[in-house]
Amino acid sequence: MRAVCGIAHGTGKRLGLVPSMGALHEGHLSLVRAAKGQCDVVAVSIFVNPTQFGPNEDFAKYPRTFDQDCVLLEKEDVDLIFAPSVDEMYPPNAVTVVTVEGLSNKLCGKSRPGHFRGVTTVVSKLFHIVEPDVAFFGQKDAAQVAIIRRMVRDLNLPVQIAVCPIVREADGLAMSSRNSYLNPQQRKSALVLYRSLMQVQKQFEGGEHNSAKLIATAKEVFAEEPSVRLDYFEIVDPGTLGALSDVSQPALVAVAAFVGKTRLIDNITLRL
Ligand code: PAF
């Protein structure tokens, strides 16, 4: 991978990287299309990264659809697919990690300790291997975006971070590889995440800017769907992920909830 990326760099080509864990859907493909639009050579990595899963999480059953992913990526005319094994990415006794202190324990980092350390460690490894000019991430993982941006800034990594909008199903559910875990009943219940965000947006547009009141509204929406267990509903600064008591600046409204055993996330940004 290094050799082939080196050739792209040597010939002055702009190299784009779309890091992924495979099980590709339209959300990933929107990143690929953005990369194709901005770069001469596009690489997609497919690696289900064990270090970002907790001991009781879904690493073993995470959907792996490599052949189908390759067909989709070939249709998008992707130049390079990098699908390393766990052993290639993590040599025996690897102990070095990258942690973005102070941000990695916010939002999903609170309920998934170690998750963001795994993400920043693998993403920095991917950046060192590929040395992309631009790397593309989805806004659905808003906390991941904030943390990766901070890592890039703090460590002077020579890569530009491009963020693409959330891609939704027709009824509003944010696309996620984990949606494939949902049975038809759960698929319906999962819409409560989007409904709660839309209700908050409506209240905000109606003049309510107090975070506690907006969050209380969202919790009422969740109370109508008792089969779904709310993990968090927070209104935070999109850069620092620190809580905002009111929305007087752009604010990230982020939600995570368990639909059965499936943990889903979603978010919107509120702007005055
Ligand atoms: O967003 C993802 O799919 C993963 O967290 C990433 C960035 C590919 C790192 O494993």
Image (tube, grey):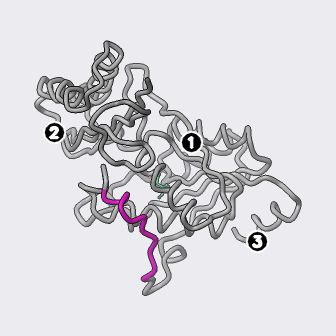
As displayed, is residue 60 above or below residue 178? below
Farthest right residue in view: 11
Front residue of this view, candidates 12 and 67: 12
Q: Secondary structure at mark 3?
A: helix
The picture quadrant where one finds residue 156 is bottom right
Given this view, does label 3 or label 1 mark the residue nearer the observer?
1
Magenta residue span:
95-105
Name the residue rendered at 34%, 30% in the picture.
247
Measured Cα–Cα span from mark 3 to mark 2: 47 Å
On residue 3, the disc is 3
The picture quadrant where one finds residue 264 is top left
Front residue of this view, candidates 271 and 47: 271
Q: Secondary structure at mark 1?
A: strand
On residue 229, the disc is 2
Farthest bottom residue in view: 93
Name the residue rendered at 25%, 66% in the picture.
55
Location of the C terminus (image quadrant): top left
- In contact (CB < 8 Å): disc 3 and disc 2: no
Q: Would you name the residue on which mark 1 appears? A: 163
First in sequence: mark 1 or mark 2? 1
Q: Amino acid at mark 1?
A: Val
